[in-house]
Amino acid sequence: VPNKYYWRGTPKLSKIVAQVVSTNSASQAIKSHKFDIADVVNSQWQAVKDAKDTKFIAKIPLAYSYLGFKVGKWQDGKNVMNPNSKMNSKSLRQAIAYAMNINQVEKRYTQGLTFRVPTLIPEQFGDYFDKNSKGYPYNLKKASELLDKAGYKKKGKWRVQPNGKPLSIHLAAMSGSAVQEPIIQNYIQQWRKIGLHVSLTGNRLMEFNSFYDKLENDDPEIDVYQAAWNTGTDPNPSGLWGPNAAFNYTRYESEENTKLINDISSSKAFDEEYQKEAYQKWQQYAFEEAFAIPTLFRNEVLPVNDRVKDWDWSYD
Protein backbone atom coordinates (compact mmCIF):
# COMPACT_ATOMS: atom_id res chain seq x y z
CA VAL A 1 0.00 0.00 0.00
CA PRO A 2 1.21 3.60 -0.51
CA ASN A 3 3.64 5.20 1.90
CA LYS A 4 2.02 8.58 2.52
CA TYR A 5 5.33 9.91 3.87
CA TYR A 6 7.25 9.15 0.67
CA TRP A 7 9.45 12.16 -0.09
CA ARG A 8 8.13 12.68 -3.60
CA GLY A 9 4.50 12.52 -2.52
CA THR A 10 2.05 9.69 -2.00
CA PRO A 11 2.24 7.10 -4.83
CA LYS A 12 -0.73 7.20 -7.20
CA LEU A 13 -1.51 3.48 -6.93
CA SER A 14 -3.91 2.32 -4.22
CA LYS A 15 -1.99 -0.93 -3.84
CA ILE A 16 0.37 -3.38 -5.55
CA VAL A 17 -0.31 -7.10 -5.29
CA ALA A 18 2.62 -9.48 -5.75
CA GLN A 19 1.95 -13.15 -6.26
CA VAL A 20 4.26 -16.16 -6.46
CA VAL A 21 3.13 -18.88 -8.86
CA SER A 22 4.72 -21.83 -10.61
CA THR A 23 6.51 -21.25 -13.89
CA ASN A 24 3.84 -23.05 -15.91
CA SER A 25 1.06 -21.15 -14.15
CA ALA A 26 2.84 -17.87 -14.90
CA SER A 27 2.88 -18.66 -18.62
CA GLN A 28 -0.85 -19.31 -18.70
CA ALA A 29 -1.54 -16.23 -16.57
CA ILE A 30 0.37 -14.01 -19.01
CA LYS A 31 -1.66 -15.28 -21.94
CA SER A 32 -4.92 -14.75 -20.03
CA HIS A 33 -3.83 -11.25 -18.90
CA LYS A 34 -4.07 -12.03 -15.20
CA PHE A 35 -1.01 -9.93 -14.38
CA ASP A 36 0.13 -6.45 -15.35
CA ILE A 37 3.80 -7.47 -15.20
CA ALA A 38 5.19 -10.97 -14.86
CA ASP A 39 8.70 -12.24 -14.34
CA VAL A 40 8.95 -15.35 -16.49
CA VAL A 41 12.01 -17.53 -16.88
CA ASN A 42 13.54 -17.70 -20.33
CA SER A 43 12.72 -21.38 -20.77
CA GLN A 44 9.03 -20.36 -21.06
CA TRP A 45 9.64 -17.91 -23.90
CA GLN A 46 8.14 -20.14 -26.59
CA ALA A 47 4.98 -20.55 -24.53
CA VAL A 48 4.37 -16.82 -24.03
CA LYS A 49 5.95 -14.99 -26.96
CA ASP A 50 2.68 -14.81 -28.95
CA ALA A 51 0.57 -13.50 -26.07
CA LYS A 52 -1.79 -10.78 -27.32
CA ASP A 53 -2.02 -7.26 -25.86
CA THR A 54 1.39 -7.75 -24.28
CA LYS A 55 4.69 -5.98 -24.86
CA PHE A 56 7.92 -7.85 -24.28
CA ILE A 57 10.84 -5.72 -23.20
CA ALA A 58 14.35 -7.01 -22.74
CA LYS A 59 17.65 -6.08 -21.19
CA ILE A 60 20.96 -7.77 -20.56
CA PRO A 61 21.29 -8.02 -16.78
CA LEU A 62 24.55 -7.33 -14.98
CA ALA A 63 24.92 -11.04 -14.37
CA TYR A 64 26.56 -14.08 -15.91
CA SER A 65 26.94 -17.81 -15.45
CA TYR A 66 30.40 -19.19 -14.87
CA LEU A 67 32.38 -22.32 -14.16
CA GLY A 68 34.57 -22.06 -11.06
CA PHE A 69 37.47 -24.21 -9.89
CA LYS A 70 38.07 -24.92 -6.21
CA VAL A 71 41.75 -24.28 -5.48
CA GLY A 72 41.75 -23.40 -1.78
CA LYS A 73 39.62 -22.50 1.21
CA TRP A 74 38.31 -19.58 3.24
CA GLN A 75 40.44 -19.07 6.32
CA ASP A 76 40.60 -16.20 8.85
CA GLY A 77 38.76 -13.77 6.57
CA LYS A 78 40.74 -14.42 3.42
CA ASN A 79 41.14 -16.85 0.55
CA VAL A 80 44.02 -19.27 1.00
CA MET A 81 45.17 -21.35 -1.95
CA ASN A 82 46.10 -25.00 -1.61
CA PRO A 83 49.16 -25.76 -3.78
CA ASN A 84 48.15 -29.44 -3.75
CA SER A 85 44.60 -28.80 -4.93
CA LYS A 86 43.39 -31.18 -7.61
CA MET A 87 42.41 -28.19 -9.78
CA ASN A 88 45.57 -26.18 -9.17
CA SER A 89 46.87 -26.79 -12.70
CA LYS A 90 46.29 -23.87 -15.05
CA SER A 91 46.56 -26.22 -18.03
CA LEU A 92 43.86 -28.50 -16.62
CA ARG A 93 41.53 -25.56 -16.08
CA GLN A 94 42.17 -24.19 -19.57
CA ALA A 95 41.58 -27.61 -21.13
CA ILE A 96 38.23 -27.93 -19.36
CA ALA A 97 37.29 -24.50 -20.71
CA TYR A 98 38.25 -25.33 -24.30
CA ALA A 99 36.19 -28.55 -24.15
CA MET A 100 32.95 -26.69 -23.41
CA ASN A 101 30.69 -26.35 -26.46
CA ILE A 102 29.02 -23.22 -25.13
CA ASN A 103 27.84 -21.89 -28.50
CA GLN A 104 26.06 -25.17 -29.29
CA VAL A 105 24.40 -25.16 -25.87
CA GLU A 106 23.22 -21.60 -26.38
CA LYS A 107 21.62 -22.43 -29.73
CA ARG A 108 20.03 -25.71 -28.69
CA TYR A 109 18.80 -25.12 -25.18
CA THR A 110 18.25 -21.41 -24.53
CA GLN A 111 16.07 -20.43 -27.48
CA GLY A 112 18.45 -17.73 -28.65
CA LEU A 113 18.03 -15.70 -25.46
CA THR A 114 21.59 -16.23 -24.24
CA PHE A 115 25.03 -15.60 -25.67
CA ARG A 116 28.57 -16.54 -24.77
CA VAL A 117 30.63 -14.39 -22.39
CA PRO A 118 34.37 -13.89 -23.03
CA THR A 119 35.52 -12.18 -19.81
CA LEU A 120 34.63 -11.66 -16.14
CA ILE A 121 33.76 -7.97 -16.74
CA PRO A 122 30.35 -7.66 -18.46
CA GLU A 123 30.21 -5.88 -21.81
CA GLN A 124 27.64 -3.44 -20.40
CA PHE A 125 30.50 -1.66 -18.62
CA GLY A 126 31.66 -0.19 -21.92
CA ASP A 127 35.34 0.66 -22.19
CA TYR A 128 36.19 -1.30 -19.05
CA PHE A 129 35.23 -4.50 -20.90
CA ASP A 130 38.08 -6.16 -22.80
CA LYS A 131 36.60 -6.24 -26.30
CA ASN A 132 39.66 -8.06 -27.64
CA SER A 133 39.13 -11.14 -25.48
CA LYS A 134 37.90 -14.20 -27.37
CA GLY A 135 37.44 -16.32 -24.26
CA TYR A 136 37.86 -20.07 -24.68
CA PRO A 137 36.23 -21.16 -27.97
CA TYR A 138 35.34 -24.83 -28.38
CA ASN A 139 38.50 -26.71 -29.32
CA LEU A 140 38.86 -30.37 -28.26
CA LYS A 141 42.20 -30.73 -30.00
CA LYS A 142 43.74 -27.84 -28.10
CA ALA A 143 42.24 -29.14 -24.85
CA SER A 144 43.87 -32.54 -25.37
CA GLU A 145 47.20 -30.98 -26.29
CA LEU A 146 47.20 -28.89 -23.10
CA LEU A 147 46.55 -31.98 -20.99
CA ASP A 148 49.24 -34.02 -22.76
CA LYS A 149 51.82 -31.30 -22.33
CA ALA A 150 50.96 -30.85 -18.64
CA GLY A 151 51.44 -34.55 -17.94
CA TYR A 152 47.81 -35.66 -17.71
CA LYS A 153 48.40 -38.85 -19.68
CA LYS A 154 45.74 -41.36 -20.60
CA LYS A 155 45.81 -44.63 -18.72
CA GLY A 156 43.16 -46.69 -20.43
CA LYS A 157 40.00 -44.65 -20.94
CA TRP A 158 40.79 -41.86 -18.45
CA ARG A 159 43.61 -39.47 -17.83
CA VAL A 160 45.63 -39.62 -14.64
CA GLN A 161 47.34 -36.88 -12.67
CA PRO A 162 50.97 -36.02 -13.51
CA ASN A 163 52.00 -38.05 -10.44
CA GLY A 164 50.27 -41.09 -11.90
CA LYS A 165 47.36 -41.12 -9.45
CA PRO A 166 43.79 -41.44 -10.76
CA LEU A 167 41.99 -38.19 -11.60
CA SER A 168 38.31 -38.04 -10.67
CA ILE A 169 36.68 -34.59 -10.86
CA HIS A 170 33.46 -33.78 -9.00
CA LEU A 171 31.18 -31.12 -10.49
CA ALA A 172 28.56 -29.31 -8.42
CA ALA A 173 25.62 -27.72 -10.20
CA MET A 174 22.19 -26.49 -9.17
CA SER A 175 18.87 -27.91 -10.23
CA GLY A 176 16.71 -25.47 -12.13
CA SER A 177 14.75 -25.34 -15.36
CA ALA A 178 13.92 -28.35 -17.49
CA VAL A 179 17.03 -27.77 -19.63
CA GLN A 180 19.50 -27.61 -16.73
CA GLU A 181 20.07 -31.37 -16.52
CA PRO A 182 20.74 -31.91 -20.25
CA ILE A 183 23.07 -28.89 -20.35
CA ILE A 184 25.18 -30.19 -17.45
CA GLN A 185 25.21 -33.74 -18.81
CA ASN A 186 26.31 -32.33 -22.17
CA TYR A 187 29.35 -30.67 -20.59
CA ILE A 188 30.23 -33.85 -18.69
CA GLN A 189 30.19 -35.75 -21.99
CA GLN A 190 32.41 -33.11 -23.61
CA TRP A 191 34.99 -33.45 -20.84
CA ARG A 192 34.90 -37.22 -21.10
CA LYS A 193 35.76 -36.87 -24.81
CA ILE A 194 39.19 -35.55 -23.74
CA GLY A 195 39.64 -38.32 -21.18
CA LEU A 196 38.56 -36.47 -18.03
CA HIS A 197 36.46 -38.50 -15.61
CA VAL A 198 33.91 -35.93 -14.42
CA SER A 199 30.81 -36.79 -12.38
CA LEU A 200 28.21 -34.85 -10.42
CA THR A 201 28.84 -34.24 -6.74
CA GLY A 202 26.39 -36.56 -4.99
CA ASN A 203 25.46 -37.96 -8.43
CA ARG A 204 22.69 -35.39 -8.91
CA LEU A 205 21.97 -31.70 -9.33
CA MET A 206 21.68 -29.83 -6.02
CA GLU A 207 18.93 -27.72 -4.54
CA PHE A 208 19.90 -24.02 -4.48
CA ASN A 209 20.45 -23.66 -0.72
CA SER A 210 22.34 -26.93 -0.38
CA PHE A 211 24.54 -25.98 -3.30
CA TYR A 212 25.62 -22.66 -1.80
CA ASP A 213 26.00 -24.13 1.66
CA LYS A 214 28.53 -26.62 0.33
CA LEU A 215 30.19 -24.02 -1.88
CA GLU A 216 30.62 -21.41 0.84
CA ASN A 217 31.98 -24.00 3.27
CA ASP A 218 34.50 -25.37 0.75
CA ASP A 219 33.06 -28.86 0.78
CA PRO A 220 35.83 -31.28 -0.29
CA GLU A 221 33.34 -33.06 -2.57
CA ILE A 222 33.38 -30.04 -4.92
CA ASP A 223 36.27 -29.67 -7.39
CA VAL A 224 34.43 -27.66 -10.05
CA TYR A 225 31.10 -25.85 -9.86
CA GLN A 226 28.72 -24.00 -12.13
CA ALA A 227 27.09 -20.93 -10.66
CA ALA A 228 25.77 -17.51 -11.62
CA TRP A 229 25.59 -14.12 -9.98
CA ASN A 230 24.76 -10.48 -10.34
CA THR A 231 27.87 -8.32 -10.49
CA GLY A 232 26.18 -5.16 -9.22
CA THR A 233 26.59 -1.78 -10.88
CA ASP A 234 30.30 -1.37 -10.08
CA PRO A 235 32.65 -3.31 -12.40
CA ASN A 236 35.45 -3.40 -9.81
CA PRO A 237 36.32 -7.12 -9.37
CA SER A 238 37.60 -6.83 -5.78
CA GLY A 239 34.28 -7.82 -4.21
CA LEU A 240 33.99 -10.98 -6.27
CA TRP A 241 37.54 -12.08 -7.09
CA GLY A 242 39.76 -10.33 -4.54
CA PRO A 243 41.87 -12.00 -1.81
CA ASN A 244 39.43 -10.97 0.93
CA ALA A 245 36.24 -11.54 -1.04
CA ALA A 246 34.04 -14.16 0.61
CA PHE A 247 32.16 -14.44 -2.69
CA ASN A 248 35.37 -15.65 -4.36
CA TYR A 249 34.23 -19.24 -4.02
CA THR A 250 37.14 -20.53 -6.09
CA ARG A 251 39.42 -19.32 -3.25
CA TYR A 252 41.94 -18.35 -5.89
CA GLU A 253 44.44 -15.72 -4.80
CA SER A 254 47.91 -14.69 -5.86
CA GLU A 255 50.27 -11.78 -5.42
CA GLU A 256 49.77 -10.77 -9.04
CA ASN A 257 45.97 -10.99 -8.88
CA THR A 258 45.92 -8.81 -5.76
CA LYS A 259 48.31 -6.30 -7.34
CA LEU A 260 46.21 -5.96 -10.49
CA ILE A 261 42.94 -5.60 -8.57
CA ASN A 262 44.43 -3.03 -6.21
CA ASP A 263 45.75 -1.09 -9.19
CA ILE A 264 42.17 -0.60 -10.42
CA SER A 265 41.38 1.32 -7.21
CA SER A 266 44.74 3.08 -6.82
CA SER A 267 45.23 6.84 -6.86
CA LYS A 268 46.67 6.49 -10.36
CA ALA A 269 43.30 5.16 -11.49
CA PHE A 270 41.76 8.61 -11.04
CA ASP A 271 43.09 8.98 -14.57
CA GLU A 272 40.33 7.35 -16.64
CA GLU A 273 42.64 5.96 -19.33
CA TYR A 274 44.91 4.44 -16.70
CA GLN A 275 41.93 2.79 -15.03
CA LYS A 276 40.65 1.36 -18.31
CA GLU A 277 44.08 -0.14 -18.95
CA ALA A 278 44.13 -1.56 -15.42
CA TYR A 279 40.82 -3.30 -16.08
CA GLN A 280 42.17 -4.77 -19.33
CA LYS A 281 45.27 -6.11 -17.61
CA TRP A 282 43.25 -7.84 -14.91
CA GLN A 283 40.91 -9.43 -17.46
CA GLN A 284 43.86 -10.74 -19.46
CA TYR A 285 45.39 -12.18 -16.29
CA ALA A 286 42.10 -13.79 -15.24
CA PHE A 287 41.75 -15.31 -18.70
CA GLU A 288 45.25 -16.79 -18.58
CA GLU A 289 44.88 -18.19 -15.06
CA ALA A 290 41.38 -19.54 -15.84
CA PHE A 291 40.32 -19.82 -12.20
CA ALA A 292 36.79 -19.08 -13.38
CA ILE A 293 35.35 -19.41 -16.88
CA PRO A 294 32.43 -17.12 -17.75
CA THR A 295 29.91 -19.01 -19.87
CA LEU A 296 26.63 -17.25 -20.70
CA PHE A 297 24.84 -13.93 -20.45
CA ARG A 298 21.09 -14.07 -20.92
CA ASN A 299 18.64 -11.60 -22.33
CA GLU A 300 16.13 -11.03 -19.56
CA VAL A 301 12.62 -10.72 -21.00
CA LEU A 302 9.75 -9.05 -19.15
CA PRO A 303 6.13 -9.33 -20.35
CA VAL A 304 4.17 -6.11 -19.68
CA ASN A 305 0.44 -5.94 -20.29
CA ASP A 306 -0.69 -3.17 -22.64
CA ARG A 307 -2.77 -1.61 -19.85
CA VAL A 308 0.50 -0.60 -18.14
CA LYS A 309 1.95 2.74 -19.30
CA ASP A 310 5.39 4.37 -18.94
CA TRP A 311 7.18 1.32 -17.61
CA ASP A 312 10.95 1.93 -17.45
CA TRP A 313 13.25 -1.03 -16.91
CA SER A 314 16.61 0.59 -17.60
CA TYR A 315 19.50 0.52 -15.12
CA ASP A 316 19.91 4.27 -14.98
Image (cartoon, helix red, strand yellow):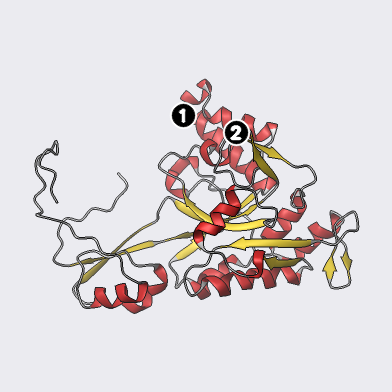
Under circle 2, the secondary element is: loop
Q: Which residue is mark 1?
A: 272
What residue appears at the point 53 percent right and 24 percent down from the top-left corner? Answer: 266
Q: What type is the residue that disc 2 sits on?
A: Gly
Q: Quadrant of residue 212?
A: bottom right
Under circle 1, the secondary element is: helix
Rendered location of residue 41, percent (x, y): 38, 67
Q: Is residue 191 left or right of residue 148?
A: left
**Pointer 1 or 2: first along the chain:** 2
Q: Is residue 94 above or below residue 45?
A: above
Q: Is residue 7 above or below residue 186?
A: above
Q: Which residue is mark 2?
A: 77
Q: What type is the residue that disc 1 sits on?
A: Glu
Rendered location of residue 73, percent (x, y): 67, 43
Q: Quadrant of residue 75?
A: top right
Rendered location of residue 280, percent (x, y): 57, 39
Quadrant location, the C terminus: top left
Q: Is residue 203 above or below residue 224?
A: below
Tell me whether circle 1 and circle 2 mark residues in contact (CB < 8 Å): no
What residue appears at the point 14 percent right and 36 percent down from the top-left corner? Answer: 7
Q: Quadrant of residue 27?
A: bottom left
Q: Is residue 177 left or right of residue 93?
A: left
**Label for residue 46?**
none
How many marks can you see? 2
Rendered location of residue 51, percent (x, y): 25, 77
Label 1: few (<14), some or many (≥20) within 10 Å? Answer: few
The nearer-to-camera label among 1 and 2 is 2
Q: Is residue 145 above or below residue 237?
A: below
Nearer to the camera, 53 or 38: 38
